Amino acid sequence: MTMDIRERDFIHDFPGIYNSMKTEGYDFSILFLEASDEVLVRRFSETRRPHPLAFDRPVLQGIAEERERLRTVHDMADIIIDTSNLNIHELREHINKLFSPSAEAKPLIISLISFGYKYGIPFNSDILFDVRFLPNPFFVQDLKNKTGLDPKVQEYVFENEEWTQFREKLTDLLFFLLPKFVREGKSYLNLSIGCTGGKHRSVAIADYLEKLLKEKGHMVRSKHRDMNKE
């Protein structure tokens, strides 16, 4: 079923109709797709289409009004997917895995994002860790222009005693939480790791977590959002 947000009566009546049909025994669920304001503005710009609620206004105003109109539906959703960092192929794969009739249980897919606080916090982060307390490779001349994927940068970050302590607490917390999320039926987890510029520390730690989680059998996709920014 699709809905037109310009039809105010339908949006108003939808919750009651949906709950009534669920009570009658219909087996269906709500999948809600969303994205950050920045990404939505870019998508409208690329398609050269006006926002349906903002023909003669800035697109951001239309997006804000749309979010407000859909707030109730968003809150009712069984599954919410942030498509900000997904391409069409990744989104299709994710939806197929969620709704495949052969799947006995829905997998927990972990979206791991490294970022720089100077560029803003990733939209819709479920869990966020600030690693700016660790020594910054940016101030080491030989490491400044490298990234957190470089072995020398990782060695610099990981040889610190504070990282060793943090790693133990971080992994203990994650492996405590992940089974709880699965038990609760959560299918998608946004895990964000942030440092100042998103180039060194957050990248190194996100890379470490990606490898560790995959070794433990978890489904992980990663993105180093700000790694190549100046």
Image (spheres, helix red, strand yellow):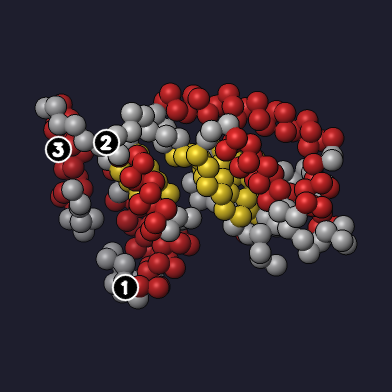
**Relative side of 131 to 175, left or right:** right
**Kind of residue at disc 2:** Pro
Q: Residue at x 50, y 50 (%)?
A: 123
Give the amino acid type for the residue marked by disc 3 in the picture: Ile
- Asked which secondary structure carries label 3, the reply is helix
Q: Nearer the viewer, mark 2 or mark 3?
A: 2
Q: Nearest to the eye among marks 3 and 1: give it.
A: 1
Q: Position of residue 45 (x, y in %)?
A: 40, 73
Question: Would you name the residue on which mark 2 appears?
Answer: 101
Q: Which element type, helix, strand or loop, lies under badge 1?
A: loop
Instruction: Decide: is 27 above or below 12.
Output: above
Q: Are marks 2 and 3 in contact (CB under 8 Å)?
A: no
Rendered position, 99 above or below 9: above
Q: Which residue is mark 3?
A: 17
Quick one: label 3 or label 1, which is nearer the N terminus?
3
Q: Which of the labelled discs sits on residue 49, or is there none?
A: 1
Residue 158 position in % (x across, y down): 80, 41
Name the residue located 65 percent from the left edge and 45 percent from the top edge: 206
**Crowding near the residue tagged with mark 2, few <14, some 14–19, many ≥20 C-alpha atoms within 10 Å:** few
Q: Which of the 4 image quadrants contains residue 58?
A: bottom left
Amino acid type indicated by mark 1: Arg
Q: Is residue 188 above or below residue 177?
A: below
